Image (spheres, helix red, strand yellow):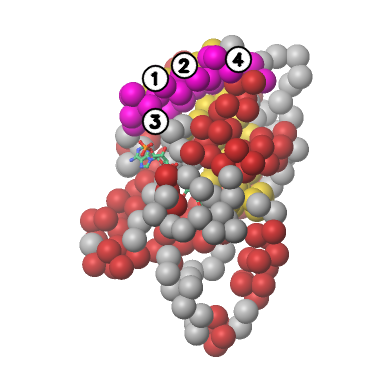
Amino acid sequence: MVEAHKDPVVAIFGASSGMAFAVAQIYAQKHARLFLIARDKQKLSQMERDLRARGASEVQTLVADLGSASGARAATELLRQRVPELDVVLIASGVLGDTDQLLNDAQACEQLFNVNVQAPLAISNTILPLLLQQKKGVLALFSSVAGDRGRASNFIYGASKAAVTAYASGLRARLRDSGVQVLTIKPGIVATAMTAHLPRGPLSANPNAVARRIVKAIEQRADTLYVPGFWRWVMFVITHLPEFIFKRLRF
Ligand SMILES: NC(=O)c1ccc[n+]([C@@H]2O[C@H](COP(=O)([O-])OP(=O)(O)OC[C@H]3O[C@@H](n4cnc5c(N)ncnc54)[C@H](OP(=O)(O)O)[C@@H]3O)[C@@H](O)[C@H]2O)c1
């Protein structure tokens, strides 16, 4: 649990993500000390101004490409030099990709796994010693409902998120008695830049509403967050469909 008497210290990797920035805005209102890591300097400056205006007690930015394990590790080591302690580490960077293109472009496929898997695992593995030393803190990783079962339309992205889900699940079990909590965030469809090319249907959630649920899950030290919540039941049905039915569904 974040201690009530001091400003929470929050680090966000992929801070320019629509959902992550909405989370940062909530923490700014709680007077948090924010450490933002993203690859776009201009976006970082705009975010810094916004978050200071909202009440953040401190905002530090770090420009880093999180498209490789080595880049992610280097950024995390730089962060470690700047922060004495951390209450929350949120790893949000990710790419969706286009399945047809990914099937025909080995480099794009490798890059998707670099951003969605290699980098988040490198960040997590590099920050863990600090969290373990503190015996507290929440490590929150963005997975996706897409990681629960590979669907015909987006199974390569889904495979990358399944890796994150499995990693977070195992790490959570391993850290059970350490004081460090691992949260797996599994959003459904959220209206951010990532889904801007898709029609905004009734299932498309607002990033601010999603961010409120994420902050609550962090405060409650939850294990897994399906967000919006109905996705837990949708995915329960989808993961229990027999394969001979599931493979006929073209979605
Ligand atoms: N939106 C959805 O429907 C949805 C559903 C389930 C899960 N998710 C997951 O939720 C997380 C947040 O996504 P979002 O919806 O908020 O999408 P978003 O707004 O498109 O954010 C994606 C973030 O990843 C960053 N990024 C991508 N490649 C990077 C790289 N090489 N180095 C550094 N940063 C990089 C982007 O940076 P730039 O700003 O510089 O491009 C951006 O900040 C992602 O992990 C995503 O897979 C999203």
Mark 4 vs mark 2, CA separation in Å: 10 Å
Identify the element where label 1 is drawn: helix
First in sequence: mark 1 or mark 3? 3
Amino acid type, label 1: Ser
Question: Mark 2 — residue?
Answer: 49
Q: Is residue 160 visible?
A: no
Residue 33 place in picture, x, y as percent: 57, 17
Question: Mark 4 — residue?
Answer: 55
Residue 228 place in picture, x, y as percent: 65, 52
Mark 3 vs mark 2, CA separation in Å: 15 Å
In the displayed structure, 146 sits above or below 132; it is below
First in sequence: mark 4 or mark 2? 2
Residue 135 place in picture, x, y as percent: 67, 28
Closest to the camera, between mark 3 and mark 4, is: 4
Question: Mark 1 — residue?
Answer: 45
Closest to the camera, between mark 3 and mark 2, is: 2
**Number of callouts in the render?**
4
Mark 1 vs mark 4, CA separation in Å: 16 Å
> Can you say which quadrant of the picture contains the N terminus?
top right
First in sequence: mark 3 or mark 4? 3
Mark 1 surroundings: few (<14), some (14-19) or many (≥20) residues within 10 A: some
Query: What residue range appears in magenta?
Result: 30-54
Question: Mark 3 — residue?
Answer: 38
